[in-house]
């Protein structure tokens, strides 16, 4: 349980006081709903979940992509993107199929990673 506390100490702003965004998430792993449904399929870096607070959108992705980029299809544009725990803006490209974010060379943290996004 200590790992959850450590993760929340860094990334809690993407959880506490947030609201659901217009899209729950995206990616290949579909969450089944209803009683006694367990998700036994592994999630990947392509699985993104969203929360929002004020004018900030948080994208929580479950794994670190091997190629160092993440495509967020639910967004058509972003003004700025930065990882939680680091105020260094990341390079992102606004494309017709979504935004492509170029991540740092290595992951800061473990388990799930959070981007703070300001939309256009």
Image (cartoon, rainbow, N blue to C red):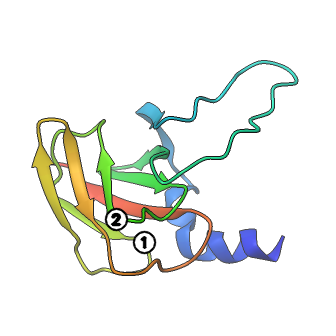
Image coordinates for residue 22, horizontal then vertical, percent: 39, 30
The quadrant holding residue 30 is top right
Where 28 falls versus 60 (above or below)?
A: above
Separation of marks 1 and 2 at Cα, in angstroms: 20 Å
Mark 1 vs mark 2: give the one in front: 2
> In the depicted view, which residue is nearer to us: 108 or 41?
41
Q: Tell me what residue is drawn at x 42 percent, y 65 percent.
A: 66
Q: Earlier in the sequence, mark 1 or mark 2?
A: 2
Q: Are marks 1 and 2 in contact (CB under 8 Å)?
A: no
Q: Element at badge 1? A: loop
Disc 2 target residue: 67
Where 120 falls versus 81 (above or below)?
A: above
Image coordinates for residue 52, horizontal then vertical, percent: 42, 47
> In the depicted view, which residue is nearer to us: 9 or 48?
48
Residue occupying the far right of the picture? 36
Image coordinates for residue 105, horizontal then vertical, percent: 34, 81
Disc 1 target residue: 84
Q: Tell me what residue is drawn at x 62 percent, y 76 percent.
A: 9
């Amino acid at each position: 349980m200590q790992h959850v506390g450590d993760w929340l100490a860094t990334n809690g702003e993407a959880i506490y006081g947030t609201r659901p965004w217009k899209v729950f998430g995206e990616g290949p792993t579909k969450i089944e709903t209803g009683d006694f449904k367990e998700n036994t399929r592994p999630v990947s870096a392509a699985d993104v979940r969203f929360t929002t607070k004020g004018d900030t959108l948080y994208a929580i992705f479950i794994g670190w992509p091997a190629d160092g980029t993440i495509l967020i299809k639910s967004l058509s544009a972003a003004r700025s993107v930065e990882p939680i725990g680091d105020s260094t803006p990341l390079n992102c490209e606004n494309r017709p199929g979504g935004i492509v974010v170029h991540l740092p060379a290595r992951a800061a943290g473990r388990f799930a990673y959070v981007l703070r996004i300001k939309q256009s």
